[in-house]
Amino acid sequence: MTNHWIDIRNSDCIMIMGSNAAENHPISFKYVTQAMEKGAKLISVDPRFTRTSARADIFASLRSGTDIAFLGGMLKYILDNGLYNKEYTAAYTNAPFIVGKAYGFEDGLFSGYKSANEGPSLGSYDKSAWAFEMDAKGVPKMDRTMTHERSVFQLMKKHFDRYDLDKVSMVTGTPKEDLLEVYKTYAASGARGKAGTIMYAMGWTQHTVGTQIIRTMAMIQLLLGNMGVAGGGVNALRGESNVQGSTDHCLLWHIWPGYLKTPRSSNTSLAAYNKKWTPVSKDPMSANWWQNYPKYSVSLLKSFFGDKASKKNDFGYDWLPKVDDGKGYSWFDLFDHMYKGNMNGFFAWGQNPACSGSNAAKIRKAMTKLDWMVNVNLFDNETGSFWKGPGMDPKEIKTEVFMLPAAVAVEKEGSVTNSGRWMQWRYQGPKPMGNSKPDGDIIMHLGHMIKEEYAHGGKFPEPIKNLKWDYETNGIYDPHKTAKEINGYFVKDTTVKGKVYKKGTLVPSFAFLQADGSTSSGNWLYCNSYTEKGNMSARRSNKDAKNNIGLYPEFAWCWPVNRRIIYNRASVDPKGQPWDEKNWVVRFEGEAKDGKYVTKKWTGDVPDGGWYPLENPDGSKRSDAKHPFIMRKHGHGQIFGPGRADGPFPEHYEPLECPVEKNYFSSQMINPTAVVYSTKDDQHATCDPRFPFVGTTYRVTEHWQTGLMTRPQEWLMELQPNVFVEMSEELAKLRGIENGERVMVSSARASLECTAVVTKRFKPFQIGYATVHQVGIPWHYGWRWPATGTEESANLLTPPAGDPNTRIPETKAFMVNVTKL
Amino acid sequence: MSKSFLIDTTLCTACKGCQVACKQWHDLPADKTVNQGSLQNPADLTYTTYKVVRMTEEELDGKLHWLFFPDQCRHCIDAPCLETAYDEEAIYKDERTGAILYTANTSKLDADEIIGSCPYNIPRQGPDGTLTKCDMCNDRVHNGLQPACVTTCPTGAMTFGDRDDIMALAEERLQKAQARYPKAALLDADELNVIYLVTQDPSLYSDYAVADAGRRGGMSRGTAIRKMLGPFGRLMNV
């Protein structure tokens, strides 16, 4: 979230799309409800009418996988009707930037496209074709009137001109009047002093165009001036209490802690690595915060290798693994390799891939190719027991499975970071049960054993031998030591800004980190979370800040540097005064003399940098100011996003499996850069009469994730005992299906028995000239519980394709058939 | 002063947190349920389920409504079950809280008669013959806590407190709701300590959302005789 949970209450218009917050983030509805009590409008956009829709002022349905069309129509509506915040757009976004002549877009393809010879990527772009035009100093050329024909603004207008109501409705199946009602209601949040917010989740991310769906909304939020303000932002609702934390600390293959880049094989030295990933701006008004990249990467290496990391050995950079350029190492890729027999061993740690991964049947088969698997979890699950699961012959399976029982969250001390970036410390409740151990103890012990093994030799032992591994006190894992390591230390006496910091002192914030090896930090974004003042995340003050908008700055701690709403310098006009006087986030309170600011002072939230505002009270421009989007190279919010794999503007493409024979927007049927896997267990079928209905998966409030923690819990099983498939009354009639009977749902990959829930909440869509039915299945089930073994995972059905930027699977739109048993 | 609940269905998201909290506090076993083609589970109140969120889909004026109704004992101010039982050792009222409470001695009552007397179709009989229902978490209330369901509700759909305060809040919430839903109403508010605020015809939420004199809650012949005979009735085992 750019904002945070409590801040939802400050919104004037809440759109919940690609998420079902009432069911899957029930506590969020406390704040949604508070906003509505103050008059906020709630819009629910979903393929079916959900418990969120039941509370909404406006409900609009759309066919799964058509979100870009839906939102593209909104963008066009905002532009056509002049409902965008012109001052904000011109001053803070890259809408005035001039795009180079090499940029082009024709029939669904941007310039620079090259199709791939071998998968899983279908193709890629040479992004240099999308570069901005630069002036002599190397600063992007801009036209703040946004009238230049190659300005981002004009190119955007042209791009989305095709997204008219007729075409959008034809693709999404949303009635035109519903589209208009949503557009009109949401666009009203662009007025000065009004804020609109979006709450999204996996309904947006899990598509072959997932990243671009979110980009479309980010563009809308920028145009409406909703970024940086209270009650605004782009807010991802995370699916677990600590998903944000795990992402921040490098759960994903392509990032290091704090969103540093995983080194590529072409980054042959630390200098080459830092050069490659440190952006350079020639604009003196761009803070270009990532210019500090080497300070963060070196501090991280110092944290990994301690005293063993020195300038002489590139701080141990060579000891770290590099990924091959252009290759993916995502979940999909790992299981593809496992399936192909390229992996011997596997730690399934706190996860249940046999049920959670798209195309789960392939994953289960892949696990039979392993020599060993270590399953670290609270309980045995479908993954640890895959060898005795449906269709498996234990005699034929060589994989040896080890179970390491882990302690549950409440049995251990440590922090979680919630969707709103709040790091909150938790204390230990009950002691771990039986032989179960906290993950920290398991990892520490494992590390010691591996180190011992390598002490006797082995290939390339340096990374293991030199790894600093001292996060224990009296032999027990110490979460405080880890938290301090993440914050970082001065590793020798260091003078910063005239002050001496003794060796061993905790670093006060990332502004103090150094690239010369004098500081360590396990994650620069968290530098400031555990300082000499104590554990900031353990704070529990309920005192609000001066602006009284629910920031509670001394409750827990949030990254970066306790800034509760990021991009908050965009919440003020160029003179530093809030767009919204009632729910202001920051304001400039420096003194002015003769119409010019002479002293610097911001109040409210921690500002995105304490520089002077862009303009003086008399309207004159200041040259010592910085643009507000400080994490962007050029300091502006990106309406044009030249860094994405699939294009600088979003474009509607159909899902890999779709019910229509053509894409009404172009002759590119699917995302031309999508990743699609192609073993014999990666079947897909599009526009295939055997699979005529759109399928999607989702969660229900009564279960959690693959159900490992909820299916063995009888009170929760009572609430949602069976895997079910929801369908319209019309579809049920078509197939002769009675409500409550068991039916078979099949895709090109597998079949799944479900209980039919025939409901008015699904309605057939009118897509083009055809009627299209959609069904939906929750994915919380697996054969291990309930003991009947009849309730299986919906991910047996989901497809082998994903987004080119993230490789997240397209589990939210695929094709199925539904038949009576 | 007695205690009351306000259950504002305009805020309910049917998360069923209240159902689980109720089971947890009362240490009740899970019912063996089967999905009957609805997200509502269990399908109805049972001997071991004192609270169930009823979920119904209705198309009204061309618009779909999904109505949620967290159903439970209303703790009637003049409770027909109590009057029908006429046995304070089986069914009694805690005058301090207004809770209508069932004891193990309910096994000695005519269950069908007690259940039949309830206008809201709440009590359920167990295999041992006893009757059960929501007890207002009377033990919690006596110790300064809110009922478990109220504590767990994330949206504030349920509030609990002194009757006067709850009545005032109910009126305030009603006025607010009427601005958006012209049919908004409080159900049998003067007779009950559990007051529902609904926005549509009450019968759409549950067959027993409101008392219907013609259907239930009327005094049976047996009850009338017992009432007439007073304490002797019990001695005579009428």
Image (cartoon, rainbow, N blue to C red):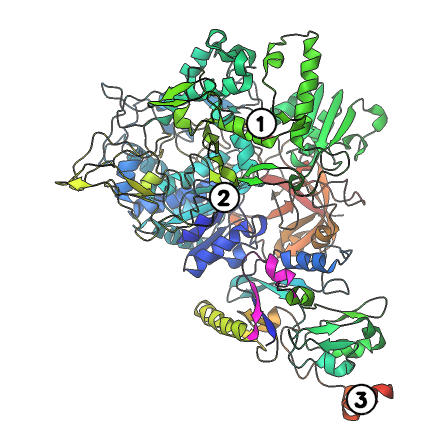
Kind of residue at disc 3 = Pro
Position of residue A18 measured from the top left corner of the image (x, y, whole percent): 51, 44
Could you tell me which secondary element the residue under label 2 belongs to?
Answer: strand
Residue occupied by mark 3: B231
Position of residue A11 measured from the top left corner of the image (x, y, whole percent): 41, 52
Which stretch is magenta? B143-163
Packing grade of label 3 (10 A; few <14, some 14-19, many >=20) is few
* Relative depth, front residue between A540 and A93: A540
Which mark is nearer the camera, 2 or 3?
3
Q: CA distance from mark 1 to mark 2?
A: 25 Å
Which mark is nearer the camera, 1 or 3?
3
Could you tell me which secondary element the residue under label 3 belongs to?
Answer: helix
Q: Is residue A6 left or right of residue A101?
A: right
Residue occupied by mark 2: A200
Q: Chain of mark 3?
A: B
Kind of residue at disc 2 = Tyr
Position of residue A379 measured from the top left corner of the image (x, y, whole percent): 74, 37
Residue occupied by mark 1: A676
Q: Are marks 2 and 3 in contact (CB under 8 Å)?
A: no
- Do discs 1 and 3 belong to a common subunit? no
Q: Earlier in the sequence, mark 1 or mark 2?
A: 2
In the current view of this chain or complex, which residue is farthest to the left? A594
